[in-house]
Image (tube, rainbow, N blue to C red):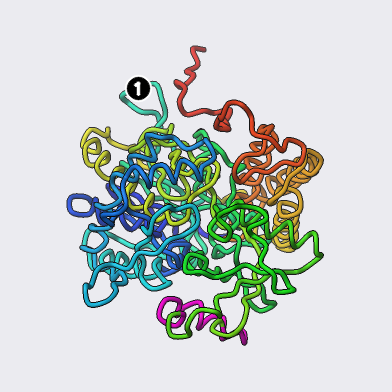
Amino acid sequence: MSSLANNKQYSHDVLIIGSGAAGLTLALSLAQKHKVALLSKSVLNQGSTWYAQGGIAAVLDSQDSIEAHVADTLNAGAGLCHQDAVRFTVENSADAINWLVQQGVDFTREGESEDYHLTKEGGHSHRRIIHSADATGKAVHTALAQRVKEHQNIEVFENRIAIDLVKQPSPNSRKLRCVGAYVYNRQQDQVDSYQAKAVILATGGASKVYLYTSNPDGASGDGIAMAWRAGCRVANMEFNQFHPTCLFHPEAKSFLITEALRGEGAHLKLPNGKRFMEKFDRRGELAPRDIVARAIDHEMKRLGSDCLYLDISHKPAEFIAEHFPTVKAQCLEYGIDITKDQIPVVPAAHYTCGGVVVDKNGQTDLQQLYAIGETSFTGLHGANRMASNSLLECVVYAQSAARHIEQTITDVAPITPIPAWDASRVTDSDEDVVISHNWDELRRFMWDYVGIVRTRKRLERATHRIKLLQKEIAEYYSNYKVGNDQIELRNLATVAELIIRSAMLRKESRGLHYSLDHPDLANIAKDTMLVPMNFAGQDIIVSTT
């Protein structure tokens, strides 16, 4: 058990939990005037942004328009996008790209004109995806991280995982406010406290709740779970996007095959070599991701096949090597030459469309707490995220949150020092097998019962399983010293419950939520809003006894 004397206490103007595109953008946008603490769950060059391949959707071409991008996003979102959020994001898309260029992001150009090369992906009516070859996320993350490391007002803390947010009464109202977080230091095995006038959750999504995912290990829904426990509403958690094409290979863990391949003409094929997407949608391989993922899932189940195939070998080898060097190199490691061979693919959990409810400034229900990026629910994605809108959302909403924080942080009342983490009543665990067993069981039943196609019976089974698991996890958490796996498992169980509850409430099939019991669209499109018992939007109940 760690000695309390070793626990450290940190104080900054701004605390950012998460170091992907959203967190890095926010840090750089505020650091000119404020001291910023940036927490990274692993090393800085990890997380979903680093692995994003395709690109960023933005209106950059004279043949394109804001109206077209808005219309495409609304269409992909299956009636649940918030039009104000969509328009706000798209109208700021060009400025977001210009800012990234100023930060040193090297986007791919073409020909002697040196114009940016724009590609087209599923659901888009125009070529509007700006990219850096097929490793856009890496290019964005590398440029922003380098700027962060060089900035004297940004202090980076690697290998830190936040446990819970800290709340205090606000002197200016009868509501609670967020003043910091307890954070586990993975290297020194201790819990430290961080306090700040503004706290931002930029922890990414929760796709690790599923057995098969394209996401890195850290995508365990930490920010969503912490915000829910702190009293914030969450919305539309039933809409988890399954990317249609992840590499299927026994040695490949979670390698995504970018949608840009289909944008450049790759064909989806059955094991017998026949194409099939035209049976499901007139747009074929360029249909939105939910349609493509369900089509692949359907054909795999119909044929009893372990995978289907993506084929771009009919394109010139030079073209493939120039546009998809990352995919080509990665597949070659597994003996697949994409200039000659078909790529075996399966759908995998990829993106969390729901999240913590925020306004256009990224503000949550809890004062001084913000959520940005995949952690948040802005209303942009609706029932299905359109390809390459995610990195755009990260930059646009990070900059919007920065402007709001800049305007309000000087009015924040002084914070009472956060008490040190108390580990005096817990012991070291000798039952870590409980964590690994529960981790495996949780992800398996979520895949089996709450996956691409759902039924009432499957969701009822999942409801029963999650209640039992949460009871075991809560007992374990209360008795043993915290560790990384324990923290993530607790958060994953919370997120799983939110997904299951949301799916049970939606009595229709819309976008990414497909129910065999309710195959039709409801007449009215409504968000699924979950409100915690300790809803932060309420006034504090003050005892008079």
Q: Is 146 displayed left or right of 314 in the figure?
A: left
Q: Secondary structure at mark 1?
A: loop
Closer-to-camera residue (263/330): 263
Magenta segment, prevailing SS (helix, strand or loop): helix
Decide whether residue 293 is among the magenta residues: no
The answer to whether 528 is drawn above or below residue 332 in the figure is above
Q: Position of residue 326 (x, y in %)?
A: 47, 78
Front one among 190 and 118: 118
Q: Amino acid at mark 1?
A: Ser
Q: Residue at x 80, y 64 (%)?
A: 303
**What is the x, y in percent for residue 484?**
57, 60
The magenta stretch spans which residues? Answer: 320-337
Which residue is labeled 1 in the image? 173
Residue 329 falls within the magenta-colored stretch: yes
Residue at the outermost top position: 544
Left or right: 372 in relation to 384: left
Rate crowding at label 1 as few (under 14), some (14 to 19) or many (20 or more) other CA atoms within 10 Å.
few
Q: Residue at x 33, y 58 (%)?
A: 24
Evaluate whether residue 314 shows in this view: yes
